[in-house]
Amino acid sequence: MSITNKKSILLCLYLALFFPLLVEAQYRNPILYADVPDMSVCRAGDHYYMISTTMHLMPGAPIMRSKDMKHWETVSYVFPRIDDGPRYDLLDGTAYGQGQWASSIRYHNNQFYVWFSANGAPGRGFVYTAQKAEGPWTLHTRPPHFHDGSLFFDDDGRVYMFHGTGHLTELKPDLTDILPGGIDQQIFERDADEQALLEGSSVIKHNGKYYLLMISMDWSIPGRLRREVCYRADNITGPYEKRVILETEFEGYGGVGQGCIVDSKDGEWYGLIFQDRGGVGRVPCLMPCTWTADGWPMLGDKDGKIPNDTTQSYMPMDGICGSDDFAASRLSLYWQWNHNPIDRAWSLTERPGFLRLKTARIVDNLFLAPNTLTQRMVGPQCSGTVSLSLSGMKDGDRAGLSAFNGDSGVLTVEKNGKKLYLVMSEQKSIFEESKHAISSVEITEQARIPINSKVIYLRIEGDFTPGQDYARFFYSLDGNEWMPIGLPVKMVFDYTRMFMGSKFAIFNYATRSTGGYVDVDYFDYITASKN
């Protein structure tokens, strides 16, 4: 081997070690193959911290941590619940697809700040602070609502919100409200090429210039991809100039747009931009961010494509979702409740080693059931298995496991009188829009089996490979011999209802009288990391 070749190999190894995103991709996108949308990332010391949208799920606003932008783990949630009206409790309407949206996380003067607005009435914002991203988080103030806002602390101590489609608003230094007499203006107008969707603000300051990143999409233009654009100015109020910094199709799902850029402590820059990917949801894609000679942050590899080494496995997801034996004294960070939980109706101590789910409200469908426990389904393939003890069920109770979304595939144990049945069904929620309430549920029953057992094992397999997006259903009476039940259910991402990727959901609700319960022994989660 020549000395020149040896030097080239050593250089590539050096670059791969110290600048892993600048050489040919040695990782596979999406970097998180699950519903983690509206990412905002900041860096504090050796770690990156990311926040994402979880809307109606509680606790909400997950904080995820990474040392390399590739391996992520959930370390806290910003808030345990939202108490802005009964709809967050699944009463007098719902908060499906609303609640916490498009948060902004910042590390400023040795303190973490999170800002977000809650969509839907009363529509005010939230500012939380913490000394450590791992919490505890404290509610600091309730400022006005700003759509898709990006919180920005400038070098001179002034504080701003970039929001909407190019609007800048100056805040009071304590972030409680708009600053009287401060800047509050439109900082640019759309050009002829930006006449449709333009939102998802994410702002940084670099080398004295202001950079505002936004998602851009115009469905009226045939062939137009979702893309990321950047607006740049020397002064915070402008004038701003624009450049398209990412516009590429990825794996048959269209364009990639909306996210953020962040620097490493060594001065390298990364982009984390999400893509709509069908039933699994909106998935983050990782890429280099390269600064051009004239000062623009360009995303993607050297050809402007999404880096993707298909010889690699997808990144492990066990920091975000996984199995649980319910032996801990606190509920795992893997889990989120569907809407605010009724805390008196669940327990990890009444039967040690089990999660007890008690009925506390009479409802007539799964979509209004309180204390439904969820976690993300993962691509390209995953399975979730739950073991349920049924001896505490009462007449009219419904318990089981669902592939949960606006259209759901559901395995339900029904207790009718003294008899138990396992029912597999497809359930479609119908919304009445004035209160975003569930007006009805269309249920297509595919199988009904009488059972005579105190314990049942339910399994759902999710297949999110291209062209699939199906959930499949199985059951066992002994945990060893498994039998399929019903037909596959197509999982759909629907922004008009839940606006969220598919979830595993464990549930128990009453249709006749409260007081029954089921005990969840374990939830076993398996992911397939490589096609």
Image (cartoon, rainbow, N blue to C red):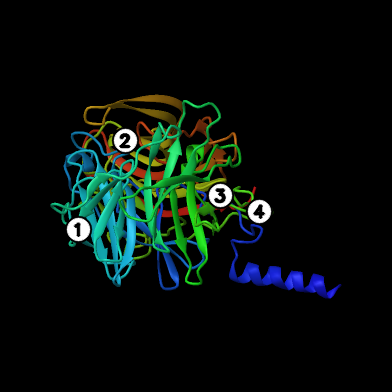
Image mark for residue 480: 3
Q: Which of marks 3 and 1 is in front?
A: 1
Which amino acid type is shown beneath numbered disc 3?
Answer: Asn
Are the residues tagged 2 and 3 within 8 Å (C-beta)?
Answer: no
Q: Quadrant of residue 482?
A: top right
Which residue is pictured at 40% across the width and 32% down the height?
196
Callout in the foreground (2, 4): 4
Spatial CA distance of label 4 from label 1 is 43 Å
- Location of mark 1 (residue): 175
Residue 256 lies, in percent from the top left, at: 51, 43
- Coordinates of residue 95 in the picture (x, y in percent): 26, 39
- At x 23%, y 57%, the residue is 127
Residue identified by numbered label 4: 309
Residue 453 visible, this orientation: no
Foreground residue among 401 and 213 = 213
Whether residue 116 is visible to the viewer of this picture, yes or no, is yes
- Sequence-wise, the earlier of marks 3 and 4 is 4
Alpha carbon separation for disc pair 2 and 3? 31 Å
Q: Where is residue 260 in the image (x, y as percent from the top left)?
A: 43, 53
- The image shows residue 440, relative to residue 28, as above or below, that is above
Q: In the image, residue 350 lies at what x, y percent?
A: 27, 59
- Judge left or right: residue 237 versus residue 174: right
Distance of label 3 from label 4 (alpha carbons): 37 Å
The three-letter amino acid code for the residue at tag 1 is: Leu
